Image (spheres, rainbow, N blue to C red):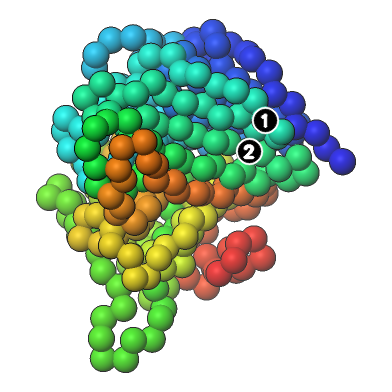
Amino acid sequence: MAKVKIQKIPYGGWKNCVQITNDLVDLIVTSDIGPRIIRYGFSGQANEFCEIESARGLTAGDQWRIYGGHRLWHSPEDEKRTYEPDNRPVQWEEFENGIITKQNIEPHTGIQKELEISLNPDNTSVKILHRLTNKGLWPVELSVWSISAMATGGKEIIPLTQRNTGLSPNRLMALWPYTELNDPRMHFGKKYIVLQQDPVIKQPVKIGISNENGWGAYFNSNHLFVKYYTHHITARYPDFGVSYETYANDFMLEMETLSPLIMIGPNSHAEHIEKWELFDNVPMPTNNETEIELLLKSRIRI
């Protein structure tokens, strides 16, 4: 049986990172800033996540920075509430096959962010428990918002709900003001929405959907990254009711999942779980849905 190794290492200009590895894949978690997973990938191979070169190794300061990697936010998005800087050191502690990393209480929101990260010893599977705790004096309504900034050049696959609702609609989509429906990076099919990350196109695009299937996939560099989460059909979600959002510009593509909106009282918390898997030797498909489905069928639950 394989074993998960956890060790402190320097990475990306930060001196105090934590590597979690089973020799097949590894994750690197920053502790000089965060909470943030800055790397996930096959050992010795490219990072599946985006890293912002200009922000590598930076700490401190009052300006929010988009370092890359995987982060935890709370929704609905607000210029003041959401963009609390995560530029300060975080606490971390080890448990079997993983670590917990916890931020100090955000001074303006009273929210404390926490990631509980565990790696399966025998394969690429990762479980991330995202926790937001209200350390303030008043109840706060929020959604736990989990964001993975993926590396350039990949293709995202988002499944469309196939539930038969008769004469009633079975899905919804949220669009942001800067999104153009004729954007060449987007392809709308019968079963999937496809979004291609293009390093040449700077214009951002963002959409959200009620993703009842509870997964999203990203093909890149002969790899396939999949994230799972739970969509609750009867729950209330932010941004017109979507549980999955995606954003792309010229240097990244974000795969974002959300928990239902919840009112959390003082010293109470909300949680949201994602599970990740990574597959090797998977070619990038065209936008043909039969081709996409053949590549996904043996690898994920569809």
Residue density around tag 1, few if under 14, some if 14–19, many if 20 or more, within 10 Å: few
Q: Quadrant of residue 201?
A: top left
Q: Earlier in the sequence, mark 1 or mark 2?
A: 1
Dot 1 and dot 2 residues touching (CB under 8 Å): yes
Residue positioned 21% across, 24% down in the render: 108
Work out whether 92 lies above or below 275.
above
Instruction: Tell me the kind of residue under disc 2.
Output: Ser
Is 142 left or right of 292, judged from the image as shown? Answer: left
**Residue projecting furthest to the bottom:** 166
Numbered tag placed on residue 288 in the rendering: none
Is 5 left or right of 201, judged from the image as shown? Answer: right
The residue identified by callout 2 is 118
Residue 94 screen position, x and y as percent: 65, 25
Residue positioned 40% across, 65% down in the render: 232
Tag nearer the camera, 1 or 2: 1
Q: Is any part of residue 207 visible from this angle?
A: no
| Front position in the image: 277 or 44 | 277
Residue 139 screen position, x and y as percent: 24, 42
Residue positioned 61% across, 43% down in the render: 126
| Front position in the image: 141 or 67 | 141
Residue 54 screen position, x and y as percent: 36, 15
| Front position in the image: 221 or 259 | 259
**Residue projecting furthest to the right:** 1
Measured in 3D between alpha carbons, the distance from the residue under mark 1 to the one under mark 2, in whole angstroms, is 9 Å
Numbered tag placed on residue 95 in the rendering: 1
Residue 97 screen position, x and y as percent: 70, 34
Instruction: Tell me the kind of residue under disc 1.
Output: Phe
Secondary structure at numbered mark 1: strand
Which image quarter is the N terminus in?
top right
Work out whether 200 lies above or below 54.
below
